[in-house]
Image (tube, rainbow, N blue to C red):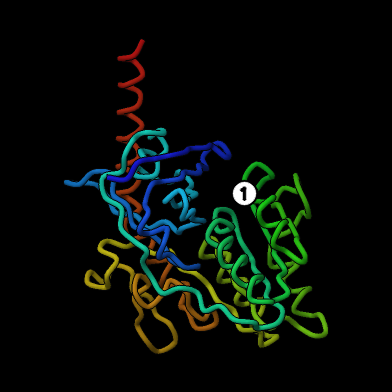
Protein backbone atom coordinates (compact mmCIF):
# COMPACT_ATOMS: atom_id res chain seq x y z
CA UNK A 1 0.00 0.00 0.00
CA UNK A 2 1.24 3.47 -0.91
CA UNK A 3 -0.27 6.48 0.85
CA UNK A 4 -1.24 9.68 -0.96
CA UNK A 5 0.60 12.47 0.89
CA UNK A 6 -0.58 15.45 -1.14
CA UNK A 7 -3.16 16.13 -3.84
CA UNK A 8 -3.77 19.22 -5.95
CA UNK A 9 -6.16 19.81 -8.82
CA UNK A 10 -4.33 21.75 -11.53
CA UNK A 11 -7.29 22.15 -13.89
CA UNK A 12 -10.72 20.65 -14.52
CA UNK A 13 -9.31 17.22 -15.30
CA UNK A 14 -5.59 17.38 -14.40
CA UNK A 15 -4.32 16.36 -10.96
CA UNK A 16 -0.99 16.27 -9.14
CA UNK A 17 -0.28 13.76 -6.38
CA UNK A 18 2.69 13.04 -4.13
CA UNK A 19 2.70 9.41 -3.12
CA UNK A 20 4.80 7.69 -0.47
CA UNK A 21 7.22 5.38 -2.28
CA UNK A 22 10.65 5.71 -0.67
CA UNK A 23 12.44 2.99 -2.63
CA UNK A 24 11.23 4.37 -5.96
CA UNK A 25 12.16 7.92 -4.93
CA UNK A 26 15.73 6.77 -4.22
CA UNK A 27 16.16 4.73 -7.40
CA UNK A 28 14.22 6.62 -10.08
CA UNK A 29 15.99 8.39 -12.93
CA UNK A 30 14.70 10.82 -15.61
CA UNK A 31 12.49 9.11 -18.17
CA UNK A 32 11.31 6.27 -15.92
CA UNK A 33 7.73 5.52 -14.90
CA UNK A 34 5.54 3.55 -12.51
CA UNK A 35 2.57 1.26 -13.05
CA UNK A 36 -0.27 1.50 -10.58
CA UNK A 37 -3.40 -0.51 -9.93
CA UNK A 38 -6.22 0.64 -7.69
CA UNK A 39 -7.95 -2.72 -7.30
CA UNK A 40 -5.75 -5.77 -6.68
CA UNK A 41 -8.34 -8.18 -8.06
CA UNK A 42 -9.78 -6.61 -11.20
CA UNK A 43 -8.24 -3.18 -11.57
CA UNK A 44 -6.62 -1.91 -14.74
CA UNK A 45 -2.86 -1.34 -14.59
CA UNK A 46 -1.79 2.01 -16.04
CA UNK A 47 1.66 3.55 -16.59
CA UNK A 48 2.36 7.06 -15.29
CA UNK A 49 5.64 8.89 -15.60
CA UNK A 50 7.44 10.07 -12.48
CA UNK A 51 7.32 13.86 -12.72
CA UNK A 52 9.51 14.42 -9.65
CA UNK A 53 10.75 12.74 -6.48
CA UNK A 54 11.72 13.81 -2.96
CA UNK A 55 14.14 11.38 -1.36
CA UNK A 56 13.97 13.14 2.03
CA UNK A 57 10.19 12.76 2.12
CA UNK A 58 10.31 9.36 0.44
CA UNK A 59 7.78 10.42 -2.17
CA UNK A 60 7.25 10.53 -5.91
CA UNK A 61 5.11 13.02 -7.82
CA UNK A 62 2.72 12.05 -10.59
CA UNK A 63 0.62 14.33 -12.76
CA UNK A 64 -2.25 12.77 -14.68
CA UNK A 65 -5.25 13.73 -16.77
CA UNK A 66 -8.64 12.10 -16.30
CA UNK A 67 -9.31 10.21 -19.54
CA UNK A 68 -10.77 6.83 -18.51
CA UNK A 69 -12.14 4.82 -15.60
CA UNK A 70 -8.88 4.28 -13.73
CA UNK A 71 -7.77 7.91 -13.88
CA UNK A 72 -11.30 8.95 -12.91
CA UNK A 73 -11.16 6.67 -9.86
CA UNK A 74 -7.63 7.85 -9.04
CA UNK A 75 -8.77 11.49 -9.15
CA UNK A 76 -11.39 10.74 -6.47
CA UNK A 77 -8.79 9.58 -3.95
CA UNK A 78 -7.63 12.07 -1.34
CA UNK A 79 -4.71 12.66 1.01
CA UNK A 80 -4.43 9.72 3.39
CA UNK A 81 -5.99 7.24 0.96
CA UNK A 82 -3.83 4.39 -0.31
CA UNK A 83 -3.06 2.83 -3.69
CA UNK A 84 -3.18 -0.95 -3.65
CA UNK A 85 -0.44 -1.73 -6.12
CA UNK A 86 2.38 0.52 -7.32
CA UNK A 87 5.58 -0.74 -8.94
CA UNK A 88 8.65 1.03 -10.31
CA UNK A 89 10.84 2.58 -11.37
CA UNK A 90 10.31 0.95 -14.75
CA UNK A 91 11.74 1.55 -18.21
CA UNK A 92 15.15 2.58 -19.47
CA UNK A 93 16.31 5.95 -18.09
CA UNK A 94 16.98 8.88 -20.40
CA UNK A 95 20.55 9.06 -21.65
CA UNK A 96 21.86 12.31 -20.21
CA UNK A 97 25.05 14.02 -21.38
CA UNK A 98 26.22 17.37 -22.69
CA UNK A 99 24.90 17.44 -26.26
CA UNK A 100 24.95 21.22 -26.75
CA UNK A 101 21.54 22.75 -27.48
CA UNK A 102 18.57 20.58 -26.56
CA UNK A 103 14.99 21.51 -27.48
CA UNK A 104 12.44 19.99 -25.10
CA UNK A 105 8.89 19.99 -26.49
CA UNK A 106 6.09 19.11 -24.08
CA UNK A 107 2.47 18.88 -25.16
CA UNK A 108 -0.26 18.99 -22.53
CA UNK A 109 0.45 16.51 -19.74
CA UNK A 110 3.65 15.61 -21.60
CA UNK A 111 5.24 18.56 -19.79
CA UNK A 112 5.21 16.48 -16.58
CA UNK A 113 7.51 13.67 -17.78
CA UNK A 114 9.60 16.29 -19.59
CA UNK A 115 10.35 18.13 -16.35
CA UNK A 116 12.95 15.71 -14.86
CA UNK A 117 14.54 15.24 -18.31
CA UNK A 118 14.90 18.96 -18.96
CA UNK A 119 16.24 19.44 -15.43
CA UNK A 120 18.88 16.72 -15.94
CA UNK A 121 19.85 18.06 -19.38
CA UNK A 122 20.38 21.51 -17.88
CA UNK A 123 22.46 20.07 -15.02
CA UNK A 124 24.64 18.30 -17.60
CA UNK A 125 25.58 21.66 -19.11
CA UNK A 126 23.22 21.85 -22.09
CA UNK A 127 21.57 24.99 -23.45
CA UNK A 128 17.93 24.03 -22.89
CA UNK A 129 15.10 25.48 -24.95
CA UNK A 130 11.64 24.47 -23.70
CA UNK A 131 8.48 24.61 -25.80
CA UNK A 132 5.25 24.01 -23.88
CA UNK A 133 1.93 23.58 -25.63
CA UNK A 134 -1.68 23.02 -24.62
CA UNK A 135 -5.18 23.60 -25.93
CA UNK A 136 -5.85 26.46 -23.49
CA UNK A 137 -4.08 28.44 -20.77
CA UNK A 138 -5.80 26.36 -18.07
CA UNK A 139 -4.05 23.20 -19.31
CA UNK A 140 -0.52 24.62 -19.04
CA UNK A 141 1.25 22.81 -16.16
CA UNK A 142 4.58 23.30 -14.37
CA UNK A 143 5.25 26.69 -15.95
CA UNK A 144 7.12 27.98 -12.89
CA UNK A 145 9.27 24.85 -12.67
CA UNK A 146 10.11 24.89 -16.38
CA UNK A 147 10.88 28.61 -16.33
CA UNK A 148 13.51 27.94 -13.65
CA UNK A 149 15.22 25.39 -15.94
CA UNK A 150 14.92 26.94 -19.40
CA UNK A 151 17.46 29.15 -21.12
CA UNK A 152 14.58 29.98 -23.44
CA UNK A 153 10.89 29.23 -22.82
CA UNK A 154 8.16 29.31 -25.47
CA UNK A 155 4.50 28.72 -24.58
CA UNK A 156 1.88 27.94 -27.23
CA UNK A 157 -1.87 27.48 -26.94
CA UNK A 158 -4.24 26.29 -29.63
CA UNK A 159 -6.76 29.02 -28.88
CA UNK A 160 -4.26 31.82 -28.24
CA UNK A 161 -5.40 32.29 -24.63
CA UNK A 162 -1.77 32.29 -23.45
CA UNK A 163 1.59 32.69 -25.14
CA UNK A 164 1.67 32.19 -28.90
CA UNK A 165 -1.39 31.05 -30.82
CA UNK A 166 0.36 28.16 -32.52
CA UNK A 167 1.06 24.46 -32.49
CA UNK A 168 4.38 23.49 -30.90
CA UNK A 169 5.73 22.47 -34.31
CA UNK A 170 5.79 26.12 -35.42
CA UNK A 171 8.47 27.35 -32.98
CA UNK A 172 10.23 23.98 -33.27
CA UNK A 173 10.65 24.56 -37.02
CA UNK A 174 11.95 28.08 -36.39
CA UNK A 175 14.54 26.77 -33.95
CA UNK A 176 15.64 24.08 -36.41
CA UNK A 177 16.22 26.82 -38.99
CA UNK A 178 18.66 28.65 -36.72
CA UNK A 179 22.38 28.64 -37.38
CA UNK A 180 23.60 26.60 -35.68
CA UNK A 181 20.65 24.24 -35.52
CA UNK A 182 19.92 22.42 -32.23
CA UNK A 183 21.87 19.27 -31.44
CA UNK A 184 18.87 17.31 -30.21
CA UNK A 185 15.11 17.52 -29.76
CA UNK A 186 12.96 15.68 -27.24
CA UNK A 187 9.18 15.50 -27.70
CA UNK A 188 6.68 14.17 -25.17
CA UNK A 189 2.92 14.45 -25.51
CA UNK A 190 0.03 13.00 -27.49
CA UNK A 191 1.15 10.55 -30.20
CA UNK A 192 0.00 12.80 -33.03
CA UNK A 193 2.02 15.69 -31.59
CA UNK A 194 5.16 13.57 -31.30
CA UNK A 195 4.67 12.30 -34.85
CA UNK A 196 4.55 15.80 -36.29
CA UNK A 197 7.45 17.00 -34.12
CA UNK A 198 9.53 14.20 -35.63
CA UNK A 199 8.38 15.14 -39.12
CA UNK A 200 9.27 18.78 -38.42
CA UNK A 201 12.86 17.98 -37.41
CA UNK A 202 13.44 15.27 -40.04
CA UNK A 203 14.39 17.62 -42.95
CA UNK A 204 16.98 19.33 -40.74
CA UNK A 205 18.62 16.11 -39.55
CA UNK A 206 18.02 16.94 -35.88
CA UNK A 207 17.94 13.74 -33.81
CA UNK A 208 14.53 13.60 -32.13
CA UNK A 209 13.76 11.46 -29.13
CA UNK A 210 10.16 10.66 -28.21
CA UNK A 211 8.69 9.07 -25.08
CA UNK A 212 5.88 6.61 -25.82
CA UNK A 213 2.95 5.84 -23.54
CA UNK A 214 1.31 2.68 -24.87
CA UNK A 215 -1.05 0.07 -23.45
CA UNK A 216 0.79 -1.83 -20.71
CA UNK A 217 -0.16 -4.71 -18.45
CA UNK A 218 2.80 -6.20 -16.59
CA UNK A 219 5.60 -3.73 -17.36
CA UNK A 220 8.21 -6.47 -17.83
CA UNK A 221 7.91 -7.18 -21.57
CA UNK A 222 6.04 -10.47 -21.02
CA UNK A 223 2.56 -9.55 -22.25
CA UNK A 224 3.57 -7.79 -25.47
CA UNK A 225 0.75 -5.26 -25.19
CA UNK A 226 3.13 -2.32 -25.50
CA UNK A 227 4.95 -3.44 -28.64
CA UNK A 228 5.77 -0.86 -31.28
CA UNK A 229 7.54 -0.91 -34.63
CA UNK A 230 10.78 1.06 -34.56
CA UNK A 231 12.55 0.94 -37.90
CA UNK A 232 12.65 -2.70 -38.94
CA UNK A 233 12.43 -3.97 -35.35
CA UNK A 234 9.66 -4.72 -32.87
CA UNK A 235 10.31 -3.08 -29.51
CA UNK A 236 8.56 -3.26 -26.15
CA UNK A 237 7.99 0.17 -24.65
CA UNK A 238 8.04 -1.01 -21.04
CA UNK A 239 11.57 -2.47 -21.19
CA UNK A 240 13.19 -1.15 -24.39
CA UNK A 241 11.75 2.32 -23.90
CA UNK A 242 9.82 4.41 -23.24
CA UNK A 243 12.17 6.56 -25.34
CA UNK A 244 12.94 5.92 -29.00
CA UNK A 245 14.21 7.66 -32.12
CA UNK A 246 11.13 9.52 -33.30
CA UNK A 247 12.23 9.32 -36.94
CA UNK A 248 11.99 5.52 -36.76
CA UNK A 249 8.75 5.02 -34.80
CA UNK A 250 5.72 3.81 -36.76
CA UNK A 251 3.28 6.22 -35.15
CA UNK A 252 0.34 5.22 -37.35
CA UNK A 253 0.57 1.61 -36.22
CA UNK A 254 1.00 2.67 -32.59
CA UNK A 255 -2.05 4.95 -32.70
CA UNK A 256 -4.14 2.18 -34.26
CA UNK A 257 -3.14 -0.16 -31.43
CA UNK A 258 -3.95 2.49 -28.82
CA UNK A 259 -7.51 2.58 -30.15
CA UNK A 260 -7.97 -1.19 -30.00
CA UNK A 261 -9.89 -1.09 -26.69
CA UNK A 262 -11.71 2.19 -27.18
CA UNK A 263 -15.11 0.49 -26.99
CA UNK A 264 -14.33 -1.17 -23.66
CA UNK A 265 -12.84 2.07 -22.32
CA UNK A 266 -15.96 4.02 -23.25
CA UNK A 267 -18.20 1.41 -21.60
CA UNK A 268 -16.09 1.36 -18.44
CA UNK A 269 -16.09 5.15 -18.18
CA UNK A 270 -19.86 5.28 -18.75
CA UNK A 271 -20.41 2.79 -15.93
CA UNK A 272 -18.09 4.84 -13.76
CA UNK A 273 -20.23 7.94 -14.32
CA UNK A 274 -23.39 5.97 -13.51
CA UNK A 275 -21.82 4.78 -10.24
CA UNK A 276 -20.99 8.39 -9.35
CA UNK A 277 -24.56 9.52 -10.01
CA UNK A 278 -25.91 6.73 -7.80
CA UNK A 279 -23.42 7.67 -5.09
CA UNK A 280 -24.40 11.35 -5.28
CA UNK A 281 -28.09 10.49 -4.94
CA UNK A 282 -27.34 8.35 -1.93
CA UNK A 283 -25.56 11.23 -0.21
CA UNK A 284 -28.56 13.57 -0.54
Considering the image in quadrants, where does the C terminus appear? top left
Q: Is residue 206 left or right of residue 252?
A: right
Residue 167 is situated, as x and y percent measured from the top left of the image, at 69, 60
Image location (x, y in percent) of residue 139: 62, 45
Say which residue appears at 48% left-offset and 37% top-offset.
7
Q: Position of residue 106 (x, y in %)?
A: 61, 61
Which residue shows up at 60% across the image and 76% down it?
198
Furthest-right residue in this view: 179
210 vs 29, nearest the viewer:
29
Q: In the image, what residue occupies the spot 46% across and 78% down?
A: 250
Q: Nearer the viewer, residue 162 or 76?
A: 76
Q: Residue furthest top?
A: 284
| Residue 75, x across and y down, in percent | 42, 38
What's the residue at 37%, 33% (across, down)? 80
Mark 1 residue crowding within 10 angstroms, few (<14) / some (14–19) / many (20+): many
User: Residue 112 lies in what quarter of the image?
Assistant: bottom right
For the residue pair 241 and 199, the one nearer the viewer reads as 241
From this view, report whether residue 213 is shown above or below residue 77: below
**Residue 258, placed above or below residue 83:** below
Place residue 96 in its image quadrant: bottom right
Residue 186 lies, with reference to residue 23, above or below; the image says below
As displayed, is residue 95 above or below residue 165?
A: below
Considering every residue shown, the one lying at the far front of the view is 56
Residue tagged 1:
141
| Helix, strand or loop status at disc 1 | loop
> Where the N terminus falls, by quadrant?
top left
Which of the 4 image quadrants contains residue 214? bottom left
From the viewer's perspective, tell me whether residue 268 is left or right of residue 63: left
Amino acid sequence: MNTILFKKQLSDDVFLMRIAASNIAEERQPGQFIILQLDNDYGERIPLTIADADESEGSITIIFQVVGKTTTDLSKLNEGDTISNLVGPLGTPTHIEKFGTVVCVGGGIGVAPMHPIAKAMKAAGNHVIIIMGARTKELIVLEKEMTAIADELIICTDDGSYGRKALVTEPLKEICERDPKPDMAIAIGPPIMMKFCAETTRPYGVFTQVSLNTIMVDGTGMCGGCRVNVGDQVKFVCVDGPEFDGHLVDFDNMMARLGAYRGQETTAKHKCKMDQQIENRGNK
